[in-house]
Image: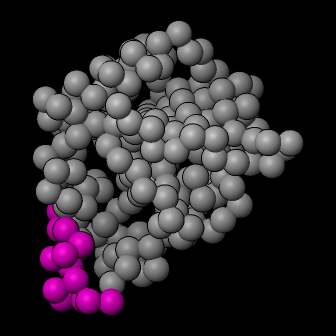
């Protein structure tokens, strides 16, 4: 197990502003999102990581680059955001007009992923991090990182619904007396 697992959610995009589900649509950061990424770099300056991984999505890669880790990062498809299938680009409010009982965490999406599939990817990321031999830094997305945090502390992936995660946030997973814990969550400037 790495000593600490540092999670960074990418900076702001047009769809994070609108609340649209952004899974596989490859959006760039807004100007504010780029500023947020630079600010993350200041917070992370001087930290050494045994491994740095990023989602292949442009918004995560750009956040990583602007934060100062572009020279050491490896792209990992397991850090991709939830595949929202037919709900890609739609807000929860829009979906609830058709399906008032819908819950992403409980039901997944038509043509997309379930929480358990996202959790399987998250568990693979944790395995890679555990083999790194030191602290690990991950650049990813809201729902995927929430599922990863749930898996870290022994909850099923659906437990990620209990953790809010804002754009350009920094969270740290660690352990206390060999028990996986959340040390810091959803830190933002």
Q: Nearer the viewer, residue 125 or 143?
A: 143
Q: Height in image: 96 above or below 21?
A: below
Indicate left or right for 127 with 16 as reference.
right
Find the magenta span and give its range.
Answer: 89-101
Q: Position of residue 78 (x, y in %)?
A: 49, 48
Q: Quadrant of the N terminus?
A: top right
Q: Position of residue 67 (x, y in %)?
A: 37, 20
Indicate left or right for 129 with 139 as reference.
right
Query: Which residue sits at x=45%, y=44%?
Result: 186
Q: Quadrant of the C terminus?
A: top left
Count of picture labels: 0
Which scheme is used to colour this image of the protein? one colour
Residue 97 in the magenta stretch? The answer is yes
The answer to whether one can see residue 80 in this image is no
Q: Nearer the viewer, residue 20 or 116?
A: 20
Residue furthest to the front in view is: 189
Q: Height in image: 24 above or below 53?
A: below
Q: Nearer the viewer, residue 4 or 115?
A: 4
Residue 15 in the magenta stretch? The answer is no
Query: Which residue sits at x=47%, y=67%?
Result: 161
Residue 188 position by quadrant: top left
Indicate left or right for 12 with 141 as reference.
left
Query: Which residue sits at x=18%, y=88%?
Result: 98
Query: Which residue sits at x=66%, y=52%?
Result: 152
Residue furthest to the right in view is: 177
Indicate left or right for 28 with 179 as reference.
left
Q: Position of residue 128 (x, y in %)?
A: 65, 39
The answer to whether one can see residue 26 in this image is yes
Residue 97 position by quadrant: bottom left
């Amino acid at each position: 197990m790495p000593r600490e697992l540092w999670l960074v959610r990418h900076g702001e995009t047009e769809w994070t502003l609108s609340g649209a589900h952004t899974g596989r649509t490859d959006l760039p950061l807004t100007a504010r999102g780029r500023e947020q990424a630079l600010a993350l770099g200041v917070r992370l300056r001087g930290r050494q990581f045994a491994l740095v991984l990023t989602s292949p999505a442009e918004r995560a890669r750009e956040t990583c680059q602007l934060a100062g880790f572009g020279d050491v990062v490896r792209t990992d498809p397991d850090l991709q955001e939830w595949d929202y299938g037919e709900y890609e680009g739609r807000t929860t409010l829009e979906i609830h007009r058709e399906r008032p009982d819908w819950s992403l965490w409980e039901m997944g999406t038509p043509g997309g992923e379930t929480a358990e599939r996202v959790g399987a990817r998250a568990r693979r990321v944790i395995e890679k991090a555990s083999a790194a031999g030191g602290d690990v830094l991950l650049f990813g997305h809201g729902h995927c990182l929430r599922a990863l945090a749930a898996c870290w502390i022994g909850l099923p992936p659906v437990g990620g619904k209990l953790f809010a995660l804002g754009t350009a946030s920094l969270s740290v997973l660690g352990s206390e007396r060999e028990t996986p814990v959340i040390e810091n969550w959803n830190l933002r400037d």
